[in-house]
Image: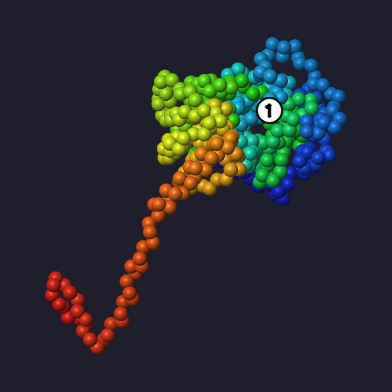
Amino acid sequence: MFSPTPNPGGKFPNDNRHSTHPSNHPSAYLRVQSPGISESYVHDQDNPTRPKAATLPSQRSPQSIFAMFPPGRGNDKPVAGEIYRISLFGTNQMLTAEGEALRLREYQKGHWDQMWVCEKNLDNRYGMRNRHTRRFIGWRGNYELVCSAEENSFYGWLNFAGLSLGGYLIMVTCVGGLKLGPLQRINPNDEHISVGEVGTQFGLHRLKDSVFRRFEWVVPNLLARSSAPYYDGEDSDESINETSIEFLQSYGIQNIISLNSVEISPRERGRLRAAKISYSHIKALEFIAPEQKQFDQIWNAYDNAGITIVYCGYGDGRTGIAISAIQLFEGRTLSDLDYRANGVQCPSQIEALNALSERIHDAENRSDPPDAPDLQPPPYPVPNTDTRSLAIHGGNAIGRT
């Protein structure tokens, strides 16, 4: 992880840049640079009463007619686990990772250095990890924007504000995580991106073949949850192929616990074995309470198995049951609200988890040893200097004074 250089005084130059963010100044307009426009004023989608700017992007040059463009307009919502292209809105210029540097380059189909995996940490903060370098966008000293962080830390938390003209204003935390600064193209002819004073209009283009949707860490770098790979409404959509395995390996996943109603094929199991990823299938049906023996199977598949991902189909109810069971086996005390927060969906499933909790606590109570008698020896008597004490050695009495 990079170490940012402190900024003297803890403030930006011309610190009024934060008037561009509605969370700090709700009445202020968002000052945004649009491609082909020197500057425009737009409003957040959450504040539709603000006037819209009557400004349109400039027409594309004749050469751009034949250029390749990413899919979609750039208005896709950020969702954890999905893969995106980030464009200079309305153009074919893509945010590209070149080592640690961030550059705007023309769209290249299939290039992983132009693909970004959206991740959300335990604080519900978004980050964007480059698919090629596996590093996160982040800020470091002198408002430099780089792609070098190994984790989704507070120097790379991103905020996406939807704009009335389309696309997003992207803000990044900086100055010790206390401020939000907008991502900005330095000037219309520059390929560099920095943390600036005027936000640039960006587009988010979700790739339609995203693999593990709704991916998130339950315990960072130890336990994750998601949808089944390629899930599109049916459990049978699950597929383990080279792309699935690449995604798992990018997170260091060593173990899969699947509660999908459909087991993968022997050929898919072989692919996982070749990649040294273990797989346990514990069949579960939606809205049906699991049996107690299935909870034991979940724990046995997880305990000491390495970095694990749990999924079912969509990645909510059955996955939440498994996550809750693991937490109970680890000694946590969970309430019905905790189960719901994990995604557990119906009363019968909650009853099954409460029964598991009671079973675990009963087993712990039975394993506790009974109160042992006090076997502490009495205090050693103070020797009498007027008498001779005896030490027994080899059956013989040896006098000591």
Image mark count: 1
Q: Residue at x 73, y 46 (%)?
A: 11
| 56, above or below 27, in the image | above
**In the displayed structure image, the side of residue 279 where residue 116 appears, left or right:** right
Could you tell me if residue 82 is visible in this image?
yes
Q: How is the image coloured?
A: rainbow
Q: Badge 1: few (under 14), some or many (20 or more) residues near its Cα, within 10 Å?
A: some
The picture places residue 223, in percent across and down from the top left corner, at: 50, 38
Image quadrant holding the C terminus, namely: bottom left
* Image quadrant assignment for residue 118: top right
- Nearer the observer, 149 or 267: 267
Q: Residue at x 49, y 40 (%)?
A: 326
* Image quadrant assignment for residue 347: top right
Could you tell me if residue 88 is visible in this image?
no
**In the displayed structure image, the side of residue 243 where residue 138 appears, left or right:** right
- Nearer the observer, 3 or 202: 202
The three-letter code of the residue at mark 1 reads Lys
The picture places residue 277, in percent across and down from the top left corner, at: 43, 29
Image quadrant holding the N terminus, namely: top right
- The residue to which callout 1 is attached is 77
The picture places residue 182, in percent across and down from the top left corner, at: 72, 35
* Image quadrant assignment for residue 254: top left
Secondary structure at badge 1 equals loop
Q: Residue at x 79, y 16 (%)?
A: 59
| 61, above or below 48, in the image | above
| 9, above or below 286, in the image | below
The picture places residue 87, in percent across and down from the top left corner, at: 68, 24
Q: Residue at x 41, y 20 (%)?
A: 266
- Nearer the observer, 161 or 190: 161
